[in-house]
C-alpha cells in the first residue's frame, strides 16, 4: 500500500547558476531538474519506473518550495499514475510531503473519495550522524463517496540513523547513512484495516534525497527503489 520510503528519491544537482534557481541546503535547483527511480519487487524483479520533475520553484513563509510532478510507469513503459507534491527547504532542514509515500495503487483506489489530507511532514537535516533520532511524521486523510466515508492514518516513528556504509547504485558510489523507521497505516471504510511495516532509506551528506529505499513486512522484503537517472 505504501510506496517504499520512501518516495523515494535523490537530487545531487550541483551549482546550476540561473536566475530562477533557488538554494536548498547549498544546492541550486530550478524548474526542469529531476530524476528517475527503478522499482523492484521483493524478489528483485523490475516492476516499473518512477519519474520526478520540478515544475515550479517559489518562496512561501521563509521556505523555498519545490513543486514536484510525479509519474509512475509499468515495466513495459505504460503510464500508470500522475501526481504532484511539494518539497520545502529552510536553513539546514529539508521537508518532504508525507502524502508522497502513498503508493500509486492506493491513490488510484482513493480517487472517488476526494480525500483531504493533513500531515506532519518528513524532515531530514543537512547532516546525519550515526545514532541520530529523527522527528516522527504522520498523514491523516478523510473523504467520502456517496454514502461511504473513509479515513486513513499513517504514522512513521522510531526514525533513527543506524549505521554508515558504502553504497553503489546506478547513480554512483556513496558513503551512505542507513536510516530505519517503523510505519503503521490504518484505513477504515466500515471495517478497519491495519498494516505495520518497516522501512530503510539510504542517504548521504550533500545529497537531498534517498539513494535507495527498502520496505519490509514481518521481516520480509516487499520492495526496493533505486536511483537510476538524474537530469
Image: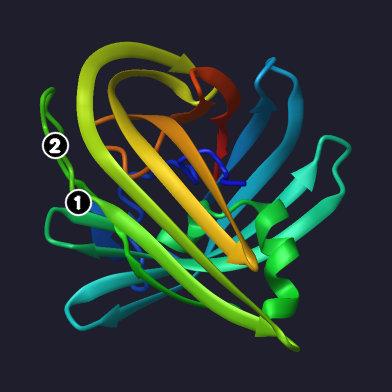
Asked whether the viewer can see residue 11, the reply is no
The residue where tag 1 is placed is 26
Residues under numbered marks 1 and 2 in contact, where contact means CB atoms less than 8 Å apart: no
Foreground pick, 100 / 226: 100
Residue at the location (45% across, 14% down)? 168
Q: Is residue 229 left or right of residue 212?
A: right
Label 1 sits on a secondary structure element that is: loop
Please identify the quarter of the rendering in which residue 139 is found. bottom left
Asked if 207 appears above or below 54 in the picture, the reply is above
Label 2 sits on a secondary structure element that is: loop
Foreground pick, 62 / 137: 137
Circle 2: is it few (<14), some (14-19), or many (20+) Cα within 10 Å? some
Q: Is residue 69 left or right of residue 140?
A: right
Residue at the location (22% across, 16% down)? 163
The figure's colour scheme reads rainbow
The residue where tag 2 is placed is 133
Lower sequence index among marks 1 and 2: 1
Asked if 107 appears above or below 157 in the picture, the reply is below
Viewer-side label of 1, 2: 2
- Residue extending furthest front? 191
- The picture places residue 102, in percent across and down from the top left corner, at 56, 55
Asked if 22 appears above or below 129 in the picture, the reply is below
As drawn, the label of residue 216 is none
Circle 1: is it few (<14), some (14-19), or many (20+) Cα within 10 Å? some
Residue at the location (57% across, 68% down)? 84
- C-alpha gap between disc 1 and disc 2: 23 Å
Asked whether the viewer can see residue 194, the reply is yes
Amino acid at each position: 500500500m505504501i510506496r517504499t520510503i520512501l518516495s523515494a528519491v535523490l537530487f545531487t544537482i550541483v551549482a546550476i547558476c540561473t536566475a530562477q534557481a533557488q538554494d536548498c541546503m547549498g544546492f541550486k535547483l530550478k524548474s526542469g531538474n529531476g530524476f528517475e527511480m527503478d522499482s523492484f519487487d521483493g524478489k528483485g524483479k523490475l516492476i516499473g519506473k518512477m519519474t520526478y520533475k520540478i515544475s515550479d520553484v517559489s518562496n512561501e513563509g521563509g521556505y523555498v518550495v519545490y513543486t514536484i510532478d510525479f509519474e509512475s510507469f509499468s515495466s513495459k513503459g505504460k503510464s500508470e499514475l500522475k501526481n504532484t507534491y511539494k518539497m520545502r527547504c529552510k536553513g539546514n532542514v529539508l521537508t518532504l510531503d508525507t502524502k508522497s509515500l502513498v503508493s500509486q495503487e492506493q491513490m488510484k483506489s482513493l480517487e472517488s473519495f476526494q480525500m483531504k489530507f493533513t500531515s506532519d511532514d518528513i524532515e531530514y537535516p543537512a547532516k546525519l550522524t550515526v545514532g541520530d533520532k529523527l522527528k516522527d511524521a504522520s498523514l491523516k486523510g478523510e473523504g467520502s463517496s456517496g454514502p461511504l466515508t473513509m479515513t486513513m492514518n499513517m504514522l512513521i516513528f522510531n526514525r533513527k540513523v543506524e549505521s554508515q556504509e558504502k553504497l553503489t547504485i546506478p547513480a554512483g558510489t556513496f558513503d551512505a547513512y542507513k536510516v530505519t523507521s517503523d510505519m503503521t497505516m490504518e484505513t477504515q471504510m466500515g471495517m478497519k484495516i491495519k498494516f505495520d511495516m518497516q522501512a530503510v532509506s539510504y542517504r548521504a551528506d550533500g545529497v537531498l534525497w534517498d539513494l535507495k529505499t527498502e520496505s519490509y513486512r514481518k521481516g520480509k522484503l516487499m520492495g526496493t527503489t533505486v536511483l537510476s537517472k538524474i537530469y
